[in-house]
Image (cartoon, helix red, strand yellow):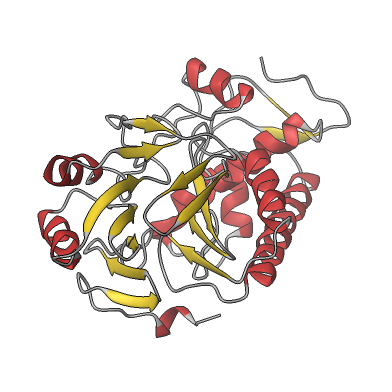
Amino acid sequence: MQAPDDFDPPIGIPQTLEPDLRRIVAPNPSPMTYRGTNTYLLGQRGLAVIDPGPQVDSHLQAILATVGPDQHISHIIVTHTHLDHSPLARPLAERTGAPILAFGGPDAGRSDIMRQLANAGTVGGGEGVDCDFTPDEFVADGAQIKGDGWQLDVIHTPGHIGNHISLGWNAACFTADHVMGWASSLVSPPDGDLTDFMTSCAKLQARNWRVFYPGHGAPVDQPAQRLEWLVSHRKSRETSILDALAQGPKSAPDIARMIYTETPPSLQGAATRNVLAHLIDLHGRDRVSFNAPLNESAIFSLCSTAEKIS
């Protein structure tokens, strides 16, 4: 895998990654997006644009300028509804006439527990969600999107957000924000769901991949090892959370400060959200209990049997 510091691509300039595949990095660098959002153009004549990115006019112009005189955009595919991935889809569709395909709107794909928590409105969340997004066509898990000389397999991979999909292209996979090489994904309830995240990792592990093309950062050229690391990393975080609670009841921020000791202050909020996701998962498995209402300030304790979220 390429070290993060080695990934410094030109912004807004298409780069060929392999035959029929180009990448343009959007001008939206941040601690959560790394160098910027990766927009992929797939195909020779009829092109699929995967994740148009944020609503930045210069990025729209960069995408359009990449389309050659004998080419056209036939599909616009959005992997999930975060503001760094989906808002440019509609302006691009208006310019090209191509339909927008996605799993669904911002609330699609949520588990029953996360739907209950969202309705209760106590756990916060909603960071960076494109609440106005609506696709022209809905794609389901297991569907195939076929274009001019290319085909994509839709793999529903909720976890980072409920409507997240990955896209299999032969032995390559566009993993968006589920698997990246430079960082692990933010999982922030009720949009993010750690239980679903782990299930989605297992789903990707069931296939033999050659390379992952993520939503941010360099290609992941050792997919199996990266997935193994992600699963191990999450299990290690779970162990650390349980060890922290073994010292006594604590809130999610308390635990985050204990176990994310090398995380800069600007990312402590994201660390707390990840801890909360773990705590909800542990509660669903009867490992911890909490004093209602469930939110970041709730006090969690170890238990042998806990009441289910209701």
**Does residue 70 lie above or below 268 as drawn?**
below
The residue sitting at the bottom extreme is 6
Q: Exactly how many numbered labels are in the figure? A: 0
In the image, 260 versus 97, the foreground residue is 97
**Quadrant location of the N terminus?**
bottom right
Q: Residue 280: give x, y in percent of width and height.
A: 66, 34
Quarter holding residue 70: bottom left
Note whether residue 186 is visible: no
Residue 208 in the image: above or below residue 94: below
Percent coordinates x, y for residue 131 in the rendering: 31, 30
Name the residue furthest right.
304
What residue lies at 33% left-to-right and 54% top-to-bottom? 48
Pick the residue in front: 71 or 231. Answer: 71
Q: Residue at 36% of width from left, 43% of height from top?
A: 82
**Vertical comparison of 85 with 212: above or below:** above
Q: Position of residue 25 (x, y in %)?
A: 28, 67
Q: Quadrant of the C terminus?
A: top right
Q: Determine which quarter of the picture holds residue 23.
A: bottom left
Q: Nearer the viewer, residue 53 or 138?
A: 138
Q: Nearer the viewer, residue 214 or 197?
A: 214
Tell me the residue at 65%/46% (across/down).
200
Task: Describe residue 8's horizontal placement relative to residue 184 as left or right.
Answer: left
Q: Is residue 54 visible?
A: yes
Q: Which quadrant of the structure image shows residue 72? A: bottom left
Residue 263 placement, left or right of 65: right
Query: Which percent across, then down, holds residue 90?
Result: 21, 39
